[in-house]
Amino acid sequence: MGKKNKVDQLVKVMWLFLGVFLIGTVYVATDGFGKSPFSSGTPGVSGGSGTIAVSSDNCPDTKVHVATINLRNALNVSAQETFDTNYILKNLDTGATLEGTDSTAGANNLVCPNRYSLQVKTADGASGDNSFVAGFDSQPGSNLNARVENGIVYFTATGQSATLDLKGTQHATLESRVKDNGNNAYVYGSAESATGTWVADGTSFYSTTSNATGTTYGTGAEIDLSVEVRTVQTDTHFADQGAWLFFDLATTVWKKPASVFWNGQALQEAKSTLRPQESMQFGTTYEYAYFIPSADFRDSTSKNTLDVIFDPLDTVNPGTSDDPAWALAAVGTYESTTSTNVLYTGAAQDDDSATVVYAVQNWDYQTV
């Protein structure tokens, strides 16, 4: 073989070795599949500055899920009225809790992908807050597995962020007026200049002819009344979780009411079913208790009517100190006074004094 041919073959061999070396280098640098083993992020998600890597459970690397809470007043049909209230978010996987105070685009940092519950806390008074979440104002993403059961929201903190648009109602106190069915006329409230005037709680009712002198009844005479009740503000509800109706009727003077009707529905005496704290608060003052379900307690769009007959014992003439009285106490959700971020439901709290959850609304009817 000539000298030139030997040189040509040597050059070909050198080029072959160089080609193999380059191919091997590229293969190793890309992990053999076109992806660098040194690159950040996950396949399909950009890595590097300004991006968030997402794991297989759809959570950011930080495991922080930002949940935004909006709560709309469902009774306001003319405007998109949201309102702030306090609520407790509980991590159902770890038991940890946190309190939120902003329900008008309020942001809360949760742990992804843990499961959570959300409960609203009661706030008393006019323009107060009810505690029952009625449902979703707009349907949340299916990845949240969100649902509402018995006024409580349950969801999974999936992904980087999500918004929960909820609907509920605002609370308000009550006003009332009374009709004397025996005389087929409305009764004066104390200091009112006309009969049939709506009056706040704490008012005494007198007679169809006077705002200072009670109604005269003979021995054993029945007092047949229709008590009308409504909230003091529009777009509100007094009892979104129901309410207790109580009667203060001394057993030495009055018989147990033979019948009690609320919006035409007969109520059954149920004092024995009061929760322990409720019994502590109301059991001594009131002889009789009746529960009104939320569905039977009308909101501010219409009035409620209580029909009741107060019947004294056959040989008793009720005097000025034996006036029949009644009260309404709404049920709400309150935070335990002994355990942080633990919520209970009732009309009275778990402190030593069994403090009422909502202010009790009460009235009486003056007799002479």
Image (spheres, rainbow, N blue to C red):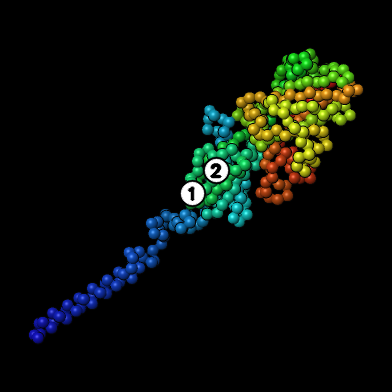
Percent of width and height locating residue 276: 77, 43
Q: Element type at marker 2?
A: strand
Provide the residue designation for mark 1.
143
Kindly identify the residue that appears in the image at 84 percent across and 27 percent down: 255
* Disc assigned to residue 69: 2
Percent of width and height locating residue 19: 23, 73
Amino acid identity at mark 2 = Ile
In terms of sequence position, does the residue under pointer 1 or pointer 2 come before the other? 2
Q: Residues within 10 Å of mark 2 (few under 14, many from 20)?
A: many
Amino acid identity at mark 1 = Asn
The total number of labels drawn is 2
Q: Residues within 10 Å of mark 1 (few under 14, many from 20)?
A: few
In this orientation, which residue lies closer to the viewer: 83 or 333? 333
In this orientation, which residue lies closer to the viewer: 270 or 134? 270
Determine the image quadrant of residue 103.
Answer: top right
Determine the image quadrant of residue 128.
Answer: top right
- Vertical placement of residue 59 versus 245, above or below: below
352 with respect to 90 (left or right): right
Kindly identify the residue that appears in the image at 68 percent across and 34 percent down: 293
Kindly identify the residue that appears in the image at 82 percent across and 26 percent down: 324
**In this orientation, does residue 209 appear?**
yes
Q: Element type at marker 1?
A: helix
In this orientation, which residue lies closer to the viewer: 279 or 9? 279
